[in-house]
Amino acid sequence: MEAVHEKKDYQILVIEDNPGDFALVEEFLLSELESPVIFNATDCRRAGEFLSDHKYQFDIILLDLSLPDKNGEPLILEIIENCRDAPVIVLTGYADFKFGIKSLALGVSDYILKDELTSLTLHKSILYSSERKKIVSALAESEKKYSELFHLSPLPMYVFDIDNLSFLDVNEACIRHYGYTREEFLEMDLKSIRPPEEVPALEKGLLAGSPDPRNNRPDIYKHRKKNGEVIQVDIQSNFIEFRGKNAKVTIATDVTERLNYIKAIEAQNEKMREISWIQSHVVRAPLARIMGLIPLVKDLNEDNDQREKMFEYLILSVNELDEMIKSITDKTRITDYQLLPK
């Protein structure tokens, strides 16, 4: 039966000092891979030379743990440090299960006993290690993009754990705006930045929250800065998985000045409505009296009593109008219309 070759030109470094073992590994590689480019280093020093030479771009490193100049854990640590993210597969003749587990914790992709090595097991290990590297690289790139979007945002942003409300991450804008250091934030939870009277509403709102990631309706809440200042914030958040935890990423936009601006406009509008009512009702009464007296003054005879009475009415109406004008002026003082900064 013809072997199925992997259609990829793998560049492989085999770190092995035993010629017989290297020949066997080479045979397995050639039988399963279409056209591998195989290099052999017989000691740790030569392996270091290969790994430090940037003309080589190794896809896989196969490592024997017993070399003339180094072995065991120190050997693994040195190769991992210099492998430039190439997956490292350990091939060993020692059936030490505990050390196998430990080597994986040190960064090794796989651990295979030489007595159990076949072309198929080696091929599978190479494929799995390569795919794992791709996934890890994709996750690292995704995390980098998240980090850039998160930390470079001009708006305060934070991530908190849904289960205990603790802060998991905060961006620079959030640190500057609230006044806490990153270390202080990471020792706090959401309740720490809410006024005490707001905490029950916070807990109630979180309990009523939907796990649907599309539930990102903005809301206005009160937050408290480190200096004690209470601000109004527009909260928009979404569910994410953050380092293995169920979390929410949140944008907290300070809308305190905007809301104060709106309140000032509403107060001014209320004054304008009051002025309009004064103009349409109060001012009209003395004005109507004056207009009614004008034709009477024109037809006025020499009756001094009647003329005196009309003048009294005119003076009364003029004084009322004067008071109304003063009242309107008071209500429209220029300081009342100085808008708050946006």
Image (cartoon, grey):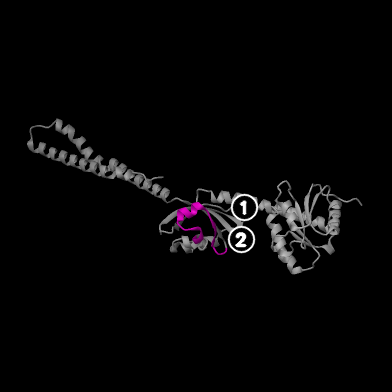
The reply to whether residue 274 is in sight is no
**Residue at (26% x, 44% y) in the render:** 330
Q: Position of residue 126 (x, y in %)?
A: 78, 55
Q: Is residue 96 above or below residue 273?
A: below
Q: Residue furthest top?
A: 298
Q: Residues within 10 Å of mark 2 (few under 14, many from 20)?
A: few
Q: Which mark identifies residue 36?
A: none
Q: Are marks 2 and 1 in contact (CB under 8 Å)?
A: no
Q: Which residue is mark 1?
A: 143
Q: Is residue 312 visible?
A: yes
Residue assigned mark 2? 245
**In the depicted structure, whether residue 72 falls above or below residue 172:** below
Residue 288 lies, in percent from the top left, at 23, 38
Q: In this rendering, would 115 be left or right of 89? A: right
Residue 170, given in percent of the width and then of the height, sits at 53, 56
Q: Is residue 332 magenta?
A: no
Classify residue 4 as left or right of residue 252. Answer: right
Is residue 166 found inside the magenta-colored segment of the image?
Answer: yes
Q: Amino acid at mark 2?
A: Lys
Q: Secondary structure at mark 2?
A: strand
- Residue 5 vs residue 315: left or right? right
Q: What element does badge 1 sit on?
A: helix
- Which segment is the magenta one? 163-184
Question: How packed is label 1: few (under 14 Cα within 10 Å), some, or many (20 or more)?
Answer: some
Residue type at mark 1 is Glu
Depth order, front residue of 328/95:
95
Q: Quadrant of the C terminus?
A: top left
The residue closer to the viewer here, 150 or 235, is 150
Nearest-to-viewer mark from 2 and 1: 1
Instruction: Say which label, 2 or 1, has the lower sequence index.
Output: 1
